[in-house]
Amino acid sequence: MRLSQRDKAIIADINRFRVMDRDSIAELHFSHLKRPINSANAVLKRLVTDGHIRRSTKFGAPYLYLSRETALSEDSAKIGHYLAILGVYKDILRHGTLDVFQVEPKYGGKGTVEPDVFCIFRKHGMTGRTPFFIEVQNTFYSQKVMTQKLKRYEELYRSGLIAQEPWQPTDRPPIFPIVLIISGQRYAIDDSYPFRVIQAQSFTQFMQSLKPAKPKEEQRPKPKTASQLKYSGGIKINLGVK
C-alpha cells in the first residue's frame, strides 16, 4: 500500500525519537480527528504489518512503536530515556514552534559531547529563534558526571565547530546554544562557562522563569536598566538568530 504523507511523517518521527508511545503519536498526528486513538491504532497496525515500524508489547498496552532504522531492542533500558526526550519535545511545542529538533546529534567521536537534543526554538508571537542544547536527565547523575558533561560542551565551544553551523546568523557574531539541563536534581554549576547554562525541571518551568516577577502593589517598580531587562526573571529568549 502506498504511504500517505501522514504515514511518512509518523515513520519519520519514530525514526527520529527511536521509540514513541501510541498516545503521543495520536496527539501529534491525529489530534484533529474525532477519534484520535482509534485512528492511530488503525494506521499503526497497518504500518507494523507492512514492515515500516516495529511494535513492542513488553510494557503492556498502549503499545510502544520502534524504528526499524535502529537496533534498539523492545525492552531496552534506553526506552525510558527516549520517551523522556519525546516528552520534552511535546512540552516545547506548547510554547512555540521548532525549526530544528535533533535527537543525540554527533559533534565528534568517542569522548566528545553528545547532547540529548539540539533544537532551534521560536516562541509564540516572536520572530527571533533560540538554539538550545538540552540534557534530559530522567535518572540520577552525580555532580562529577555533570561537570564532565559541561567540560565537553566547553571543548565544543572552543573548537569553533558550532560557529560554522548553517543556522548561524550572517550579520552578527556566532551564537553558542544555551545548555538547558532538564532534571529533578539541582547541580552546583558556577558561571565560569563561556556559554549560558540553565537548570529547570521542565521546559515549561524554564519558560515560566522568563516572566518578570510582578512588583508588590505597595511598591512603585523602579525603571530597569538594559542589562536587567535582558535577564529579567531568567534569560532573554529572542537571541536574534536569522
Image (cartoon, rainbow, N blue to C red):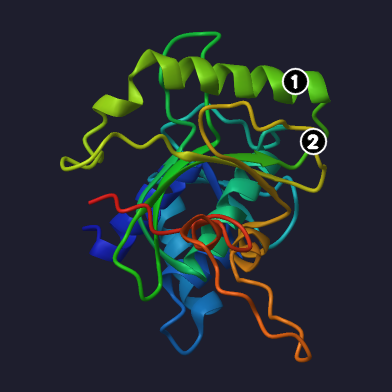
Q: Does 99 appear above or below 41?
A: above
Residue 18 at what x, y percent from top left?
A: 51, 40
Circle 1: element type? helix
Q: Does 16 appear above or below 200?
A: above
Q: Please report the residue visible at 44 percent of the width from the left and 39 percent of the height from the top.
A: 177
Residue receiving disc 2 = 187
Instruction: Report whether residue 143 is seen.
Output: yes
Quarter assignment of residue 128: bottom left
Residue 17 at what x, y percent from top left?
A: 49, 44
Q: Nearer the viewer, mark 2 or mark 1?
A: 2
Q: CA distance from mark 2 to mark 1?
A: 11 Å
Q: Quadrant of the N terminus?
A: bottom left
Q: Are marks 2 and 1 in contact (CB under 8 Å)?
A: no
Q: Does 214 appear above or below 47?
A: below
Residue situated furthest left in the rendering? 170
Instruction: Specify whether 5 is left or right of 80.
Output: left
Q: Please report the residue visible at 71 percent of the width from the left and 21 percent of the height from the top.
A: 147
Q: Please report the residue visible at 61 percent of the width from the left and 17 percent of the height from the top.
A: 151
Residue 132 at what x, y percent from top left?
A: 47, 44
Residue receiving disc 1 = 145
Q: Does 35 appear above or below 76?
A: below
Residue 228 at what x, y percent from top left?
A: 56, 59
- Please name the amino acid that badge 2 sits on: Tyr
- Please name the amino acid that badge 1 sits on: Val
Count of numbered labels shown in the rendering: 2
> Which comes sooner in the sequence, label 2 or label 1?
1
